[in-house]
Amino acid sequence: MPTPVLLTLDLLARYLRHLADDRRLGETTVAGYREELGLLVRRAIPLEPEALAAFVTRQADGTLLAPSTRNRRLVIVRGLCAWLVRERVLAADPTTGISRARVPRSVIAAPGVADVERLLGVLASEAPSWRRARDTTILLLFFYTGLRVAELAGLDVAQVDFATGHLRGATRKGGGRTDVVLHPCAAEVVRAWIEVRGRDDGSLFPSRVNPRGFTSAASSPVVYRLTTRAIQLRLARLGERAGLAVRLHPHLLRHAHATALLRVGVATEIIRQSLNHASLATTARYLHGDEALLRDAIGRLPWLSARMGA
């Protein structure tokens, strides 16, 4: 029998460079690939159909992965194998017989305008501070732009264009760059936040705590970029304090952005553009059922006269 092919650290490094340099995938996306494919290296999993089917289906302890996690892992492994075939490391793609898992449709209760106002009220109850101003700006930017957490965390002060009302060249999922429209309320809050944080051209949302946990003095220059994890934790705590029924996280605020646009009559194609989705089918998952919208739409149908007789 032929010796099974294993993914080596050298091959993994070459593939990740291919993703970054040739396919222009963003830093966060490449990091996700590195994390998943690194498991193949550490566990010495052979690149064969049976072994890869088990890898994309189950955790190391045999527990089944969630359907969405399985599909994500399959896409990552399938991309690697296709590249290895082109590089003539593999004779054929061992993932061709592995099928995608069926993901059950779920309804996400997106926060409404009243929920966002409640969150702002919790922040307003804090003593005035650098952190309160920053967190207020983050919350409103999520709601008014629908940005993903990595997209928001990657913003710099120099990208804010108050003259035209845009965030210029925001790095989007996949590594592309687009200009993001700023709502006047968001622009006003961002302007006030920049006055608080200082007008240097660094990260729009810095932290006084670096990723290793060291805190700088309040008078020291701000040099650390707020991490996506820090933003997630801040929002989760804020949601708890506001008494929201669901755990607050950045992606939920993308749903809130989409739902708010839908409620004011914005066309689905425009919502797709705002969310930076490649497909309307993806956007449709954000526009989950809203009974109030449905009732209002049905109520606008014309009255028709009918003669009822026995």
Image: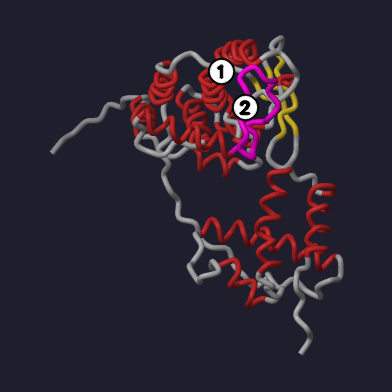
Q: Residue furthest left?
A: 310
Give the camera-side residue of 134 and 291.
134
Viewer-proximal residue, 165 or 282? 165
Q: Secondary structure under badge 1? A: helix
Q: Sequence-wise, which precedes: disc 1 or disc 2?
A: 1
Residue neighbourhood size for the residue with mark 1, other residues' Cα within 10 Å, grouped as few (<14), some (14–19), many (≥20): few
Amino acid type at image mark 2: Arg
Whether residue 14 is visible to the viewer of this picture, yes or no, is yes
Please give the name of the residue rendered at 56% of the width and 39% of the height, measured from the top-left corner: 283
Give the quadrant of residue 281. top right
- Amino acid marked by disc 1: Trp
Q: Mark 2 points at which residue?
A: 208
In magenta segment, residue 187: no
Question: Visible in this render: residue 207?
Answer: no
Give the image quarter of residue 166. Answer: top right
Relative vertical location of residue 12 with respect to residue 156 in this rendering, above or below: below
How crowded pointer 2 is (Cα within 10 Å; few <14, some 14-19, many 20+) is rated as some
User: Magenta-highlighted stretch: main secondary structure?
Assistant: loop
Q: In which quarter of the image is the N terminus?
A: bottom right
Which residue in the structure is indicated by mark 1?
Answer: 130
State left or right for residue 45 relative to residue 107.
right
Q: How is the image coloured?
A: secondary structure
Where in the figure is residue 208, as x and y percent of width and height? 62, 27
Q: Label 2's element?
A: loop
Position of residue 68 measured from the top left corner of the image (x, y, whole percent): 53, 56
From which residue to which does the magenta span run? 206-228
Q: Which residue is drawn at 70% across and 18% down?
A: 160
Q: Are marks 1 and 2 in contact (CB under 8 Å)?
A: yes
Residue at 45% x, 55% y is 104
